[in-house]
Image: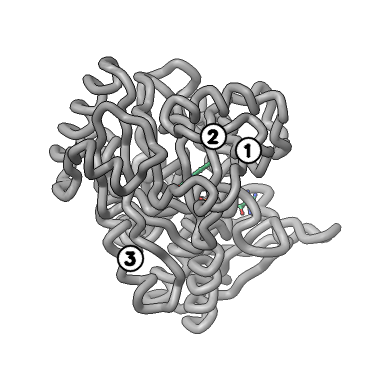
Amino acid sequence: MDYSLVIIGAGVVGLACAERFSRDFDSILLIEKNSRFGEETSSRNSEVIHAGIYYPNGSLKSQLCINGRNMLYEFCSNNDIPFSKTGKYIVAVNKDDSENLSNIYQNAMNNGVNDIRYIKLHELNKAEPNIRACEALFSPSTGIIDSHRLMYVLEAKSIANHCDFAYNHELISIEKINGGYNLTIKSDDEIFQISTELIINSAGLESDNIAKSAGIDIQKENLMISWCKGNYFKIGHKSKFGINHLIYPVPQKNYSGLGIHVTLDLSGNLRLGPNAEYMNSKVKNYSVDEDLKSSFFESASTYIKNIKLEDLSPDYSGIRPKLQKSGEPHRDWYISEESDKKLPGLINLIGIESPGLTSCLAIAEYCRKLI
Ligand SMILES: Cc1cc2nc3c(=O)[nH]c(=O)nc-3n(C[C@H](O)[C@H](O)[C@H](O)COP(=O)(O)OP(=O)(O)OC[C@H]3O[C@@H](n4cnc5c(N)ncnc54)[C@H](O)[C@@H]3O)c2cc1C
C-alpha cells in the first residue's frame, strides 16, 4: 500500500484528524481539491466556540461539542491561537421566548453544561445596556476563536509529524481492493491512482458523494446532504453599539439555525447572522443578497435597542452540509467506520455542520477510537 491512511478534505475537521492520526501513523496523506486549507465552510462560519447548550442529550453533537470545546480552549492556550472566552447571553423578548428559554436551560443542564445560569435583568442591563430582554441566560463557557490560526497550527503540527499534504488534488473515486482501497485522484489534467489501507472522508459539502463513490447507497441509508446557506451582515465595531458579548435570540422551534444572532470577532467587529436558507441547487454561490437586509434588521431590532437599518451591510456567507432536510426534525452527525457495509477502514463524516469547528479535536479523537 502507498499509504496507511488518506484523509479527504483540509477543512478544520480533516486537519484535526491529520494532526491526531499523525501522532500514531507513519504514512498519511491528506488530499484537498483547493489550493489551501479551509477554503470552504471552515472559513465561512461564526468562529464561535459553542458551550453545548442546544443539542439533543446523548447526541454526538452534544458529547463532542462539550469535550471539544474543553480540548479546544486548552489547545489554543498551549499553541498561541488567539481566542476569547467572551461569554454569551441568550435573550427572551416575550412570553413564548421565555418558555423556550426554560427548555434551553433544562437541555443545557441535562447535557452537563452546568455553568449556564439565569441572570437578573439589572445584571444584563449593566453588562449590555443596549440589549432588550424580559429574561436571559448567560453562558460563560462560550467564546470566539481565530479559526484560520487554528487550521494553520493543525497543518503545521501534522507536517511536523510527517503527514503529506496534496493541495489541488481532487478525489474522483474509491475502489475497494484486498486489504484497502484504490483512490483515483485528479490534479490539473493528470489522473492517477494511489492505494491506502484506511480512509477518512471529511469532505464537508461533498462528503455524501464521496461515500457514494465508495459504493454506499446514500439514498437508502438516508445520507444525502442538503445545502443550507447562512448569510451575515456586518454592523460595525462593538464600541458603536456598546455590545461586549455574543447575543443570541431564542431560536424558533424546528428552526434550522440558532436565529439571527450577534457575533463578535477578535478585532471587536460585530455581525448579524447567520440565517438559514435551504438551497435549491448545489452551486456554491456565496454572494449575500442585499434584499435580506430588512428581515435581518427586523430580527435584530427586537433585541438591539439602538440599531438602524443603515447600520447593516452585506458581509459573507457559508453553506451548512445538513442531513436534516427542510422542515424535518433534528439529525445528528453521521460518523461511522463502515465495516458493517463491507468497507472496513473507511470512516465517513457526513453532515458535519455546527458545532463542527468547536468539536474538531473531539471528532478527531472519536475517529481515532473507531480504528
Ligand atoms: C454559516 C455557518 C456558521 C457556522 N458557525 C459555527 C460556529 O460558530 N461554531 C462552530 O463550532 N461551527 C460552526 N459552523 C460549522 C463549521 O464551520 C463546520 O462544522 C466545519 O467547518 C466543518 O469542517 P469540515 O472540515 O468538516 O468541512 P469543510 O470546511 O467544508 O472542509 C471540507 C474540505 O473537503 C474538500 N473536498 C471536498 N471534496 C473533495 C474531493 N473530492 N477531493 C479533495 N478535497 C475535497 C473541500 O474542498 C473542503 O476544503 C458553522 C457553519 C456555517 C455554514
Instruction: State whether label 2 is within 8 Å of ligand 1.
Output: no
Q: Is residue 62 visible?
A: no
User: At which x and y percent is residue 343?
Assistant: 44, 47
Q: Is residue 128 above or below residue 171?
A: above
Q: Residue 82, relative to residue 282: is it above or below?
A: below
Which residue is nearer to you in this view: 29 or 281? 281
Which residue is pictured at 29% across the width and 46% down the height? 126
Secondary structure beneath disc 3?
helix
The reply to whether callout 2 and callout 1 are in contact (CB within 8 Å) is yes
Residue at the spot 18% in from the left edge and 38% down from the top edge: 120
Q: Which quadrant of the figure has residue 35?
A: bottom right
Considering the numbered disc 2 on the image, is that residue within a helix, a strand or a loop?
A: loop
Location of mark 1 (residue)? 311
User: Amino acid type of disc 2?
Assistant: Ile
Q: Distance from label 2 to label 1 (Cα)?
A: 7 Å
Q: Position of residue 73 (x, y in %)?
A: 33, 65
- Which residue is at the front of the view, 231 or 345? 231
Looking at the image, residue 205 lies above or below residue 178: above
On the rendered structure, is 239 left or right of 290? Answer: left
Which disc number belongs to residue 73? 3
- Disc 1 marks which amino acid? Asp
Pick the quarter of the image with the N terminus: bottom right
Camera-near label (3 vs 2) is: 2
In percent of width and height, residue 34 lies at: 70, 57
Instruction: State the residue position of label 2.
Output: 307
Q: Position of residue 132 (x, y in %)?
A: 36, 31
Vertical order, 191 against 316 (above or below): below
